[in-house]
Image (cartoon, helix red, strand yellow):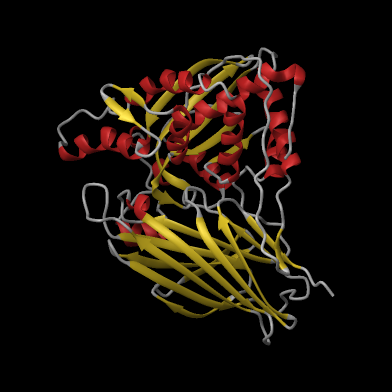
């Protein structure tokens, strides 16, 4: 266990962690203090006895990054800083996390909040008159003719989505420079309520089990059923939640739980950050909290990226299982990816339907498709130093779809020093993953849960 104590900075650490926690839930900052020591526990990795072994995360480096962020957020330098927060509903999954329904702008100075602004993304989009052609799946599967802010997170790479959001923000007629950007998925709301316990706002009770679903019902259902209702303030309830959540967090009496919680949300990409300051950006890149696709990984690579093209919140009911088989014994390495999708929705309603996804897989550059099942013929391209293949995939309610994609890796692939990186898509829940490796020395298996980026390496014990 790593224990990181900051004896003289306890108050500062608590302030910074409180800032991040409240950002995660309501996009409202809080400045507070306490006299408790902060500790962050490492997340242990359970390994099977195998030559194919996980590479553990560098917990110490992550804690050092937290210290840097703490110092930045709490320094007294009379400089006002501005941050844009993307509030993403991952019950409707997009490549960069959840559907970008709201955004917030927060300004801070000397460790305190000077102003906050929260707006529905649709209101910003109404001010965009430019006709920007959207990515292919929006046109083909959703008949969307104009690309706007709410659909800006179509890349699995967070820095790319930040640039696109800034572009649409300027097109809306807004101006202003930001010191940082934070993406927060709605799962964080449930996870906070698991810590605080239930809260009741305007007669509605929200719990760790139903928080996101209940909030979705409060701010969406009535307005979908009755289009005559004024939608301008339909999400005002989120502002009312802020003080109740904060009170709940600080009444826990165990600040280390808050620290562990924030650490976990960063690791599983429910929170991603991007800073204008090159020093801070370099720090979060070291901890891999920047949401960036790995460009410098020298080995096998896989990232599975779903985009819900059904408009509804069906991802709440989607469960996934993954099996990745890699055979290094042939003329060229051959990989077989099996993704089992289960749509557990019992029936369709105003927020649930059959699942319609645009699935992209990112694999080593130069890979070629050999076979496929239960997915469409792909769109193939290259970006981020990878080859990607984009498929449509459908899962009927109450059933499952077993998608299979088989491809060969490039001829110059290094099979003597096998390493594998599986990057996690932001907004996707925990996915059981089975990796099967076949080499001239034998066959090896590894089972893990994709709740953060997974790294594996083959070790020859001879």
How far across and how far down the image is residue 353, in percent?
A: 26, 56
Q: Position of residue 201 (x, y in %)?
A: 31, 22
Q: Is residue 154 above or below residue 136?
A: above
Image quadrant holding the N terminus, namely: top right
Q: Is residue 404 above or below residue 359?
A: below
Q: Can residue 314 be seen by looking at this rendering?
A: yes
179 with respect to 26 (left or right):
right
Query: Quadrant location of residue 108?
Result: top right
Label tally: 0
Q: Is residue 128 visible?
A: no
Q: Residue 331, position in %: x, y?
A: 68, 87
Pick the residue in front: 454 or 381: 454
Report whether 218 appears left or right of 92: left
Instruction: Name the quadrant containing residue 202.
Output: top left
Residue shown at 73%/83% (left/top)?
Answer: 440
Viewer-proximal residue among 173 and 307: 307
């Amino acid at each position: 266990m790593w224990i990181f104590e900051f004896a003289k900075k306890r108050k500062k650490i608590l302030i910074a962690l409180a800032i991040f926690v409240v950002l995660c839930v309501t996009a409202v900052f809080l400045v507070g203090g306490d006299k408790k020591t902060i500790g962050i526990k490492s997340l242990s990795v359970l390994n099977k006895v195998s030559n194919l072994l996980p590479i553990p995360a560098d917990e110490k480096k992550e804690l050092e990054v937290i210290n840097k962020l703490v110092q930045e957020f709490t320094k007294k330098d009379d400089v006002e800083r501005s941050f844009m927060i993307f509030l993403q509903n991952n019950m409707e999954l997009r490549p960069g996390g959840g559907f970008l329904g709201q955004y917030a702008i927060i300004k801070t100075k000397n460790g305190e909040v000077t102003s906050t602004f929260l707006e529905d993304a649709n209101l910003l989009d109404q001010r965009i008159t430019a006709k920007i052609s959207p990515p292919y799946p929006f046109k083909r599967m959703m008949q969307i003719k104009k690309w706007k802010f709410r659909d800006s997170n179509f890349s699995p790479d967070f820095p790319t989505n930040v640039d696109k959001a800034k572009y649409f923000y300027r097109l809306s007629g807004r101006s202003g420079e930001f010191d940082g950007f934070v993406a927060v998925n709605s799962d964080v709301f449930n996870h906070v309520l698991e810590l605080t316990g239930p809260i009741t706002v305007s007669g509605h009770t929200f719990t760790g089990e139903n928080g996101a679903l209940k909030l979705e019902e409060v701010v969406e259902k009535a307005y979908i059923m009755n289009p005559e209702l004024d939608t301008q303030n339909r999400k005002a309830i989120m502002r009312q939640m802020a003080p109740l959540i904060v009170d709940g967090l600080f009444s826990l009496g165990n600040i280390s739980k808050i620290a562990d919680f924030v650490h976990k949300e960063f690791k599983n990409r429910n929170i991603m950050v991007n800073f204008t300051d090159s020093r801070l950006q370099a720090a979060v890149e070291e901890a891999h909290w920047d949401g960036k696709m790995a460009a410098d990984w020298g080995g096998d690579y896989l990232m599975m990226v779903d985009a819900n093209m059904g408009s509804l919140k069906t991802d709440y009911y989607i469960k996934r299982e993954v099996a990745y088989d890699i055979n290094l014994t042939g003329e060229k390495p051959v990989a077989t990816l099996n993704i089992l999708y289960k749509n557990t929705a019992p029936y369709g309603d105003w927020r649930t339907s059959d699942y319609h996804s645009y699935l992209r897989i990112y694999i080593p550059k130069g890979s070629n498709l050999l076979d496929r099942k239960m997915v469409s013929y792909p769109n193939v391209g290259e970006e981020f130093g990878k080859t990607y293949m984009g498929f449509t995939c459908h899962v009927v309610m109450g059933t499952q779809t077993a998608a299979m994609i088989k491809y060969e890796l490039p001829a110059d692939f290094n099979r003597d020093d096998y390493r594998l990186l599986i990057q996690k898509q932001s907004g996707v829940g925990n996915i059981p993953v089975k990796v099967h490796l076949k080499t001239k020395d034998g066959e090896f298996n590894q089972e893990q849960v994709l709740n953060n980026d997974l790294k594996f390496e083959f070790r020859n014990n001879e």
